[in-house]
Image: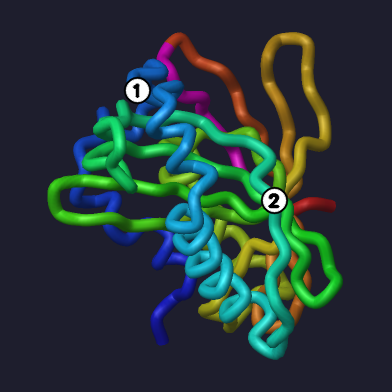
Amino acid sequence: MIRILALMAVGFGLMPLTALAQAPDDGFGAPAFQSFLGSEFADRLRREALQRSIGLHEPGCVEPIDFAVTDTWPVAPVAIGEGDIAPTEGMWRERLAVSVCEEPVIENLVHTFTADGQRTFLLVRGRTEASLPTQLALINDARDVASGDDNGLGCDIIRFTDTHVVTRYGDGRWLERWNADACGEDVDLDILFVPTLDAEPTYSISAAR
């Protein structure tokens, strides 16, 4: 059986690692791009991604999706011509406040536009402050720790349902709680992020007690 969370990283393996680093605001504030972010086309991309998430997390939910974009972050420079309906290249993250069958959730998306086409990827739900490269690096480790928990034993489909910061330390470290669903059982992980001299922090993952 395919592990569902592996789908999050599909497609990123085709991109150089440098493309995943936070990039300057090149083209991000351009009026044409800001107009695109508020367009029906952009909303359609968001709704299609949210439908995939609901299919994973709430397959029985058939009500219309209500959402609002709460945060947007550039990842790679955006190129869009004045009057164009969509970028020709670019990569950015979005955080959405979503109502799913009257339950509030926080969804995180990554949009990419390249010469080969457009893709929108789902990241873990919640308010994690881990960057895109860090999330992609740790997701398989987090899944493995969750599957090794007593509640996760024998489950090969791990879905992370929420993430949030638990503690901030004075030396720049921070602790997050990642909640997972393991074949109907709850598994909670604590992930400690430690800043480094490089752009990305290191991390350690343990079952929450």
Task: Determine which residue is flagged by label 2.
Answer: 68
Q: Residue at left 68%, top 14%?
A: 172
Q: Amino acid at mark 2?
A: Ala
Near-viewer residue (140 or 48): 48
Q: Is residue 65 above or below residue 92?
A: below
Figure quadrant of residue 58: bottom right
Q: Where are the magenta residues, as a range?
A: 198-205
Q: Does residue 114 sit above or below 122 in this rendering?
A: above
Q: Is residue 143 visible?
A: yes
Mark 1 highlights which residue? 27
Q: Secondary structure at mark 1?
A: loop
Against 171, residue 34 (above or below) is below
- Determine if residue 141 is in view: no
Q: Residue at x 65, y 45 (%)?
A: 69
Image quadrant where one finds the N terminus: bottom left
> In the displayed image of the protein, which residue is found farthest to the left?
115
Relative horizontal placement of residue 165, taking residue 42 as reference (left or right):
right
